Image (tube, rainbow, N blue to C red):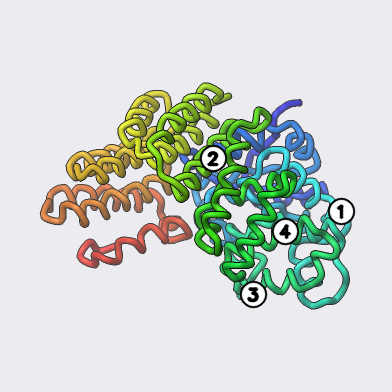
Amino acid sequence: MTAITWWQGTLAAALAQAAAQQQPLFLYWGAQWCPPCNRVKSEIFAHSAVQTLSRQMLCYQLDGDSHGAQALAAQLRLRSYPTLVLFAPDGSEITRLPCELDGERFAAALAQALAAHAAGSSAAQAMQAALSAGRALSVAEWNLLADYSWDTDEGALLGERALAPTLLALLGSGVAEVAAAAAMRLRLHALLAQASSPEQGADLLLAVCADEAVARANMDILNNYGIELIKLCARRETVAAALRDRAALWAQDFWLAAPDKLAAARLQLRMARLLAPSAGLQEVAREQVAAALDAASDGYQLHTLVNTAVSLLNEAGLGADAEYLLQSHLPNSHTPFYFMLSLAGSARRRGDTAAALDWYQHAYETAVGAATRIQWGVTYLSQLMEQASADGARIAQARQALLADLATAGADAQYQRNHAQLQKLARWPQLGF
């Protein structure tokens, strides 16, 4: 099976071609430096089942650093990297898909989205039918809503609705009687949206962890939001122990990809620390990191593995190990400036302000891409204002460099992620941004 074929040209031309061919259009919005984006490339786009499904669609990559990308993203309601959207041939959205799913689960979610479209439905139509009680939803439609990427919605599906009451309304629409697996996932989303009581949350997480199939189907939520979920539950020690034990199994699962195993190892460590902090966890963390890095299959996967490994090592109190890992991977990284921000953070935690500012500066000076340079420039300038406000010459130099980047970006500097970054400088009106 060959790799996914990505449309070359403008998005407008891609949408026109999709309409002409009467094919859905799959949109990937991301950036070269983004660890979740790199995971998507190595785990989802490289999966044979996803590649097979891609033949039913026209596929388009929208890089956040490309010319006019941020303005276009504002029109399409794209913000977080990565965002994965499936459009109908008429340009309307079928659904938004979670980037945290593994390849197998993502293929299943994409297949059900394509099937729903073929049957004349979409996430918006399914939600409207459920909320209005206009008709009964099929199992496929409930699965479409359960696998919707609420994190990257940006109002595309919700509109002006708040997430928590919307999820509660969906759960009250009979989903449990029709699609038990979809109901469980929607309940997890509702818990994260703080729409459940602490006792309900505890019961839910214990039930999820007790069922291997259910836990596996929701591994993305548990791995990425385990700490947040625990904070919303009663009986935290009991729930943390159940989540720790489930994560420990995933961390050693031969069939899981290295990024998911390492994310599970991090979850295992976090739960173990909540229960009984122990120095013995450090050696386990080192072993898990070494095994994951040895299993890296390509540069994209290695990038996300190093990022997760650094987080895991810091959680284990191994800051020096984390810094060494970052330093050792700078020469071969395709976006070393991303890891330089982590090195700056490590220096800050050590209280070494000078080293931190040097890393922030080096990261900015080596950053590549219009939107990326604005983000890194704002970060560097903000740190100078916070940590070295008396260094007028250095601040002036950083300000001028950022102004040059804004000029290069042109009108795109006023949209989406660029605009959000510049808003961070509003604390210092003297800078004139």
* Residue shown at 82% from the left, 47% from the top: 21
Q: Earlier in the sequence, mark 4 or mark 3?
A: 3
At horizontal 35% and vertical 39% (from top left) the residue drawn is: 317
Q: Which residue is drawn at 50% across and 33% down?
A: 305
- Give the CA distance from mark 1 to mark 3: 30 Å
| Mark 1–mark 2 distance (CA, rounded to whole Å) | 35 Å
Q: Is residue 26 left or right of residue 264?
A: right
Q: Are marks 2 and 4 in contact (CB under 8 Å)?
A: no
**Residue 270: x, y in percent?**
47, 46
Which circle, 1 or 2, is nearer the viewer? 2
Eyeballing the image, is 282 above or below 397? above
Name the residue type under label 1. Answer: Ala
Q: Mark 4 points at which residue?
A: 184
Contact, CB < 8 Å: mark 4 with mark 3?
Answer: no
Q: Is residue 33 left or right of residue 394?
A: right
Q: Which residue lies furthest to the top in this view?
A: 294
Between the C-alphas of marks 4 and 3, the distance is 16 Å
Specify the amino acid type for callout 2. Ala
Residue 284 point in image, percent of width and height: 46, 31
User: Regarding mark 4 in the picture, which secondary structure is present there?
Assistant: helix
In the depicted view, which residue is nearer to us: 177 or 424? 177
C-alpha distance separating marks 2 and 3: 30 Å
Q: Residue at the location (46% across, 39% down)?
A: 33
Q: Is mark 1 on a helix, strand or loop?
A: helix
- Horizontal relation, residue 119 to residue 255: left or right: right
Of the image marks 1 and 4, the number of the one nearer the N terminus: 1
Query: Dot 1 corresponds to which residue?
Result: 118
Q: Nearer the viewer, mark 1 or mark 4?
A: 4
The disc at residue 165 is 3
